[in-house]
Image (cartoon, coloured by chain):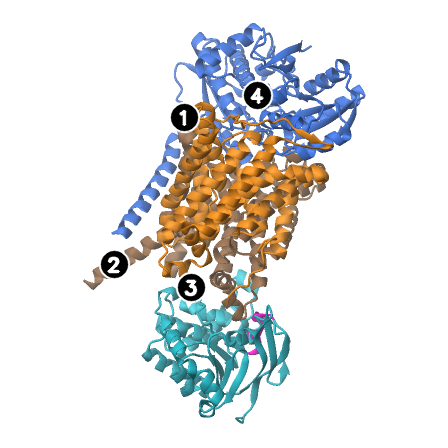
Amino acid sequence: MTHGLNILSINGISISFGGLKALSDVNVHVMKNTVHGIIGPNGAGKSTLFNVITGLTKPDSGDIFLEGTKLPHIKPHQLVPLGISRTFQNIRLFKEMTVLDNVLIGQHVHTPTPIISILLNGRKSNEYEKISREKAIEALEFMGIEDKMNDIVKNLAYGQQRLVEFARALAAQPKIILLDEPAAGMNPTEKVNLLSIIGKLRDKGYTLILIEHDMKLVMNICDNISVLDHGKIIAQGQPEVVRKNPDFISAYLGKGENLNARNKRN
Amino acid sequence: MFMRNKSRISALIVVITIGLVLSMTGCSGGNTPSSEKVLTIGVVGPESGGSAQLGQGQHNAIQLAVDEINEQKLAGEWKLVAVFEDDEGNPTKSSSATNKLIQESKANIIIAAINSSATLADMVVTERAGIPQITPGSTGASITEQGNEWIFRTAANDSFQADALVKHAKEELGITKIATFTSADDYGQSGANLLKAAAEKYGLELVANPTYNNGDKDFKPQLMSIKDGGAEGVFLWGLYTEAALISNQVQQLGLDVQLFGASGMAAQKLIELGGDAAQGLILTQTFLPDADIPEVQEFVQKYTEKYDMDPIPHGAQAYDTVYIIANAVKNTDSSNPEELRDALRNTEGLNLVTGSPKFDEKGNDIGKRLLITEIRGDKFELIKAIEAK
Amino acid sequence: MIRYILNGLPIGAIYALVALSYSFIYAASGVLNWSQGDMVMLGAYIGFTVYQILNLGFVPAFFISMLAVAIVGIGIQRFILRPLRKSNAPAINVTIATLGASIIIRNLALMIWGPDAQLFPFPVSNKPISMGSLSITPQDILIVLIGILLMIIFQYFLKKSKEGKALRAVAQDRYAAVLMGIDTEQSDRSAFGLSAAIGAVAGILIAPIFFVTFNMGAGIGLKGFVSAVVGGLGSVPGSIAGGFFIGIVESVAGGKISSGYRDAITYTLLILVLWLRPTGLFLKKRKQKV
Amino acid sequence: MNKNKKIYLLIILVLLLTLPLFVSNLYYLHIINLVGIYTLVTIGLNILSGYTGQTSMGQAGFFAVGTYVTSLMMMNFDLPFFLALLIGVILTSIFGLIISIPAMKLSGPYLVLATVGFGEIVRLVLLNWTPVTKGAAGLTGIPFPEIFGLQIKTEKQFYYFIIIFVILGIYIAGRIAKSKIGRTFSAIREDDLAAEAMGVNVAGYKTAAFVISAMFAGLAGGLFGTFSGVTSPDSFTFDDSISFLCMSVIGGNKTIIGAVVGAFVLTVLSEALRVFQGTRLIIYGFILIFTVIYMPNGLVGIIENLKSKILMKKENKSME
């Protein structure tokens, strides 16, 4: 296994829906300041695992440790203050709002809500608002879309919407960012851009966990990979190690056709 | 192209809206004074909504009376003009309508409304403006208990009715156990109280007193509880639709009870809708189209001639109300509201469709004739007419 | 107690039909038609006109009314829902527009048929048959029977016919149905037409016991909606069960607890059901997909 | 721009304050006063339905609680108006808090029906709890408010009295809408799950929206009772809830000013249509349908569209 500081540990997570095992005894260790890929064919349990991490689904057994402390079962909105933010597989932005407002929601937990000051148009609320704006614009600049700041999100191209979602996750000032198929629907140029953004984020000290179908992208960018199949981890480690794993080859690449079909649909 | 079309339509709507708003302002001229003496009567009633049948009946009868009075110059030199507004039975809309009639149409006197809650709301407006108001339809007890000197009521006197009904049940039919089954509105609630008081007065046992909401369709649950109480007579206090349904369901449940009712449900429709089941229902009313009374016959004849349908009791009361107003304006020869009010209070010597009106100090018409009737065949048969003392 | 339950059945059958019409539109088109109660009223009035005024007999009245009201339903789809879908208006706009339609239909009925209640008797006896303390009329039995028969026909139609299958496909997943080449416009139309016709039947069935008035739709429509939601909006068996359930609850609450608070009890129950089992009493819980 | 805005605001304010000088017809003033009261209800509804996306068809229920509590406090306990109003608003907010508990889990038709149920329950309790609410007849002789010994009594006095609350209400709602709170409300409307994932306490904010809308309706109710002098359950029917919702949507429910426009247009419209007598409700229905079809974002949306169109034209011209 790789060295470094363990930031997120998933220990023995099992969960079943109506008798069907979705995850069984899943162990994943994510190192700080790395890009960790979770791959697997459709229905392997990747999304379930994400939902468990983000508190949307409660596991039947197993624990999650964040920087060595056990995560209690929390509500989804309590996750951001702990330092985990996410993007969604099928972009979930606030479509009728401006790009800036979307990213400002990412800032939500980091400034207080001084009700009295808001009602009186007081200095405090204006100051907080200013700080939030600065942070949000910073995130937009990082993504290179600060010029779209005042556009309504639904008018943006798909690839740009992904970036807005990314910026929103970034504005939450997380330690870990969960990316759910970030490259889905992107054209090759946008993918290259995405790769460089992910790389830059890692360089800045963020930890990223991503679910992705684009094998090339995963192999290119990830430091570590966990392969899920039928709710179980079948291979784990650095890309070059995993690539040679026989289980991985039979379970995953054997179904290459399906994989391609899916990529096309997206 | 589509876009342009769309914005054109929306522009059109905006224009219409603005036009409507302006037209409202434009109407404000009102009646310009002419050599003729004109008394404007503002009428508020529910011409749509749940009690539309009462509001429309009132509208027709008032128009009939106004036309007659003007034709035959029964109001002296005064010409009557009636302006009608719909309140949908909603108190807020009713008070807006009353405001409009007073401010815009310059009404000298207001006839309003049918629903008690609307009448109460209108009274606030007429009292503030100092304009006399007559309600021909609202029977709620609280209306004349406000200490409001501008309100008059030409509707049937409910306590008189409750008393007469309970007395009749005891003395003529020998009933000892009764139940009340009343609508949960102001009319029904005050009816229930009056019946209870009457029952105590005559020593009858009240075994059940359920209520229903207007618009209800299924009354069997309440009727079953009445059956369990062993009532011999059931007193209904509400409108005819519900009364007809109740009598139907009494029959369906095989309940062996005598049904009683009050003037609120007195309408030919009750007999039609109630059919078999309504036979034998005893009710008091102020107006009976078949009654062998010349004033009644004349009214019914004129009304059916003009509208091709039978008048409703509310209509008869509203019709009389206009005659009372005509009499008052003729006597004072003034449209000054205070003089009109005093003239109304001194109404006497009129022989109208529903009796010889006379107001007590609270504004109640205590001169109404009361008819105890029973449904036999397709009409109400008069059992007894009680003239007011 | 049994008396009260028995008494709730005929009304329950009517509620079930109205609930069905709500559910059906909701499932097939994803919107709610707030003028559904007025379809009940229109059905009753048209039936009344054909049967009592034109004297064409009860069975023709039944079918003419269904057809005429179905056309009104399709008209609502054509002139209200379609333009709203085209302009991508929010769901609330459909609500307001159908409420507007309800106001129009109700007041047109007031103009056409007048404010008085009309009598529309069934050609069967209204005399009770007694069994001990229980009694029921042949009319009530007929109402329940016709209601149940119609529900069975309806269910059969959905399961077996081509149209019905298409409707079910759209109800399952509108987007996927479009991909499969199903004309959702057509399914909207069928849903509105059929629901209106079901409403018309409810109107005719309820007319003999409740009379026909221009504003009868308001109460029945709302109760039908409540029944649909309590039973499981979008599900045929759920709506039917919901209808009978609310019918019985009202009967028992009105007789045993308080007649004045009867509707308040129904609504409290509704809120409790929504709170504890948002998908309805008689439907399995569904998981929200993330 | 900012300076311009301030000047406009000042002009509007002066116009509002001098309005009774131009409008001598008390009927118009009466309607305008009603518009003011309805505006407050609609503002609350816009925050709840327009911003947070929780459609309520039971707003008349909150309005009723505010009316009855405030009026009863004045009548039974001889409390001064402002204290009574405060209690009315607080109690109404508590109702908002309670109804938000089941409402939180609901959306779409389920939420709509739950709020309908709430409104009807309130009305039925008012109708049947006779010892306190006086049943169907309702409350009569609700006292006038008094400020510093001056009794607010005439339509004109009520105009100034109500307008203060309306301006205050618009200001407060505007602050909320423009702030972080308003932004968060909108985010919940757009996608509550994503908002939750970004750390927003969605349940808390939904409750807050309910409480705020209840507060506005309660405040309006308190004014409505003393303004009308009488009140009864007939003023708080399902139809009234619908009409509040129509005001909100027709005006434009995603802005605060939309509430003012909606309350004004629909109240004035339903009075203006009186000209048409029997067909007025039919016309009203048609106007509702046309508006929601051709102005999906309400009247304010149309104004905004026109504005951007004019701006575009100007730009095009300068390009040439």
Disc count in the image? 4
Expressed as whole percent of the image width and height from the top left, the position of residue D234 reads 58, 36
Q: Is residue B325 left or right of residue C270?
A: left
Residue at which label 4 appears: B136
Residue at mark 2 shares a chain with residue at mark 4: no
Callout 2 amino acid? Lys
Residue for point 21% across, 63% down: D319
Q: Residues within 10 Å of mark 4 (few under 14, many from 20)?
A: many
Contact? badges 2 and 4 (CB < 8 Å)? no
Q: Which mark is residue D314?
A: 2
For label 2, the crowd category at 10 Å Cα-Cα, with few meaning under 14, some 14 to 19 and many 20 or more, is: few
Q: Is residue C267 visible?
A: yes
- Which chain is tinted orange? C
Q: Chain of mark 2?
A: D
Tag on residue B30?
Answer: 1
Q: CA distance from mark 1 to mark 3?
A: 51 Å
Q: Are marks 3 and 4 on the same chain?
A: no
Is residue A251 positioned above or below D249 on the image? below
Q: Residue at x 71, y 18 (%)?
A: B165
Report the mark closest to the observer, 2 or 4: 4
Looking at the colours in the rendered structure, which chain would you say is drawn in brown? D
Mark 2: secondary structure:
helix
Dot in front, 1 or 3: 3
Which residue is pictured at 43% across the width and 69% down the height?
A: A91
Find chain A in the image and tell me its colour.
cyan
- Dot 4 falls on a residue whose secondary structure is loop
Q: Which residue is mark 3?
A: A97
Q: CA distance from mark 2 to mark 3?
A: 26 Å
